Amino acid sequence: MRPKLKFLSEDLIRQIVDESVGILCKLGVELNNVEVLSMLSDYGAEVDIPNNHVTLKEDIIQKALDTSPKSFKLYDVSGVETNDFSGYKVHFTPGSAALNILDYHDNRIRKPLTSDYIKYAKLVNGLDHIKSQSTAIIPADVHDKISDSYRLFLSLLYGDKPVITGTFTIEAFEVMKNMQITVRGTEAELKEKPLTVFSACPTSPLKWSDVTSQNVVDCARYSIPVEFISMPLSGFIAPVTLTGTLVQHTAETLSGIVISQLTNPGAPMLYGGSPAIFDVRYETTPMGAIETMMIDCAYNEIGKYLGLPTQAYIALSDAKQLDAQAGLETGIGATLAALSGINSISGPGMLDFESCFSLEKLALDNEICGMTLRMLEGITPKEDFPTLPRLEELLQEGHLLISDHSMKYLNEEQYFPKPIIDRANRPRWIDEGSLTLGERAHRQVKESLDQYSSNSLSDDVKKELVRLMEKEAKKYGMDALPARDV
Amino acid sequence: MELLEQISISLQKGDHQKVYDLTKEAINNNLPPKEILDDGLLVGMNVISEKFRMHEIFLPHVLLAAKAMYAGLDQLKPLFIEGEMPNRGKVVIGTVHGDLHDIGKNLVGIMLKGAGFEVIDLGKNVPAENFVETAISEEADVIGMSTLLTTTVPVMKNVIELLKSKQPNGKVKTIIGGAPITGEVAMEMGATTYGYDAANAVERVKQLVGDR
Ligand code: B12
């Protein structure tokens, strides 16, 4: 039996959804994009263009929900299926878009560079339990107008796994789409086998910027999946109660679903978010707070109720270093998220309120993910009835270390984490250098990087990707891209 | 208890109705407006600021107290002769061009207002010229800029340079803040200073304008 966790009764879910639909039909949303406003108006929404405002109607919302796909899949650069976003299936992906990287060597933060990104992409390629890349850091050694497309470019050049990403501007969409078409061959094949998910953030409360609403439209047109990232902050720019926050999150996310589905019915979407409580003592948005995690798991239940696959920023920490807090917040988050069946769990590798990325933490978190995924397998009998003969064997042999039953099921029943997780006895631990968690994680990072060979794209495709990127960089006065020989 | 002390205490409790009533009473008793302000409202607000700075109380308490302060202050304002109203300083604040993150900036604005500064909030995605023109035409003391994106950090430099070219005497000081901003970044951008949260911002802005 797959273990499951629920925070909301179906009655409460219905109440939350009804309330949020009511809000969309009464208060509506601010939408700073004339093209999107006029589209909504064509479908009968009440639009006030001078005031950038739209009030929705129940039937429009229902129509959008009716065409929302219940599931979709992602495929790696060579077209192999990696992520099935359906039902209670869960997949982990690194946290995204950190401002800083935590440098192992001096334990200080700094701006990430191209070389960091390449290491990151290579590392992700080798991590078993991380099913997609995310554009986790923003290299600071390119023009900021290409910082979004450049991350995707490096991910496609060095990694195999699909990419969770997003644009910072309307203009960047074009080249980011073209890179994907280059990898797949044709627009139709890209549609058939999605390679990326684009994050699209409404602004709490109840607002869509020009850029993000346009991104939703552009993605929908090419059937590029989007994840809606609504971020109500409980007690600050959302009600202080978790239920009230859920109502606001539902309303904001539903408005995104409407924009996407009216543009292109059936366009793939993840019902996502990055809500948080607001800690009035520190003026921060703690991702590791238990209440934040409860909101995540609960809106995922609402997404499932509405029939959509889900996503959340959870399984990450607000700690500044790879310390006990980093482990506990990530571990609790991963466990709760997996039990709740959040389909795309964004978080591993991330520290400091989504603002700092650590390769060492990512390697550690990969183990947390491994354990969590094992937990989801649950407890199922495997030739356990009768157990009597096994005990007879045990009494006779004195152990079951090499019994047929053990040999058959050992690897299924037990997950063996990499030696980042310390399971040695003390003398052996001392013998092997008394390594701290950070040292073990760093060793793992180095090993994974050593094992990397190359990704599976052909040289021709890579050349075309480079050409596209260089052309884009030239637009902003960059005659050459940073060196990539790390 | 003396009336002014009662005003200070009610303000600290965040009881805006009581501060309103007591201020009215003080005005009716012909107490000089400057005394009501200095020995009543500001005494209370200074206690609150200090407790906030020491992390003894948190944002909501300060906001309640600030609301209470304005319940009194708004009645006093018309009683001051033009130019006589003590003024802590004027701050033009906004999120720089290209960035739509305004939560932190808003918080800083609210707290500056609470601390008695006049705040002109230009909103988000603010072009450099707006910052500079407003600061000059409004005779502001400080420009406060916020950004949360790596990509828009350099935009702050544009504002600071434009300011320098339009007003080389350095009369208008600059303070910057937001997740990517550190002391080092502030130096690089040429800002006068930086702040890392709302309490810190208030403290730094106070330093910038000097005690008045
Ligand atoms: C909420 C949020 C949003 C909301 C913003 C809503 C709003 N009205 O502001 C929305 C959803 C709209 C959003 C959008 C985007 N976001 Co955002 N967002 C955040 C998040 C989670 C929290 C920010 C926040 O409000 N914090 C709470 C406030 C109180 O804290 P604060 O802003 O830091 O402010 C405090 C201090 O910094 C200081 N301060 C701030 N300003 C000033 C000014 C002065 C003068 C002083 C003295 C002090 C000061 O005092 C404040 C009070 O304590 C951050 C994560 C993070 N760790 O910061 C990401 C984050 C900033 N966002 C990020 C990104 C990538 C985006 C998008 C580009 C995503 C996308 N693809 O669409 C868009 C940007 C659109 C644009 N052009 O601006 C990245 C930035 C990455 C980078 N390297 O630049 C972050 C770090 C998250 C991440 N890892 O992905 N975001």
Image (cartoon, rainbow, N blue to C red):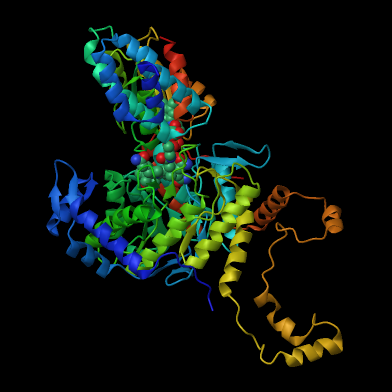
Quadrant of res A262: bottom left
Nearer the observer, B194 or A395: A395
Pick the front one: A7 or A258: A7
Image point 55% across, 60% down: which residue?
Answer: A334
In the displayed structure, A119 sits above or below A451; it is above
- Provide residue A354's location: percent of width, then percent of height: 50, 46
Q: Is residue B89 above or below residue B196?
A: above
Camera-side residue of A275 and A120: A275
Q: Residue at x 38, y 49 (%)?
A: A231
Q: Quadrant of the C terminus of chain A?
A: top right
Work out whether residue A459 can be spotted.
yes
Residue A131 seen in the figure: no
- Location of residue A222 in the rendering, given as x and y in whole percent from the top left corner: 30, 60
Q: Quadrant of residue A40?
A: bottom left
Location of residue A161 in the rendering, given as x and y in whole percent from the top left corner: 51, 61
Q: Where is residue B89, by image quadrant?
A: top left
Residue A430 spot, x, y in % from top left? 85, 53
- Against B210, residue A466 (above or below) is below
Q: Quadrant of ligand 1?
A: top left
Position of residue A236 in the picture relative to residue A99 (left or right): left
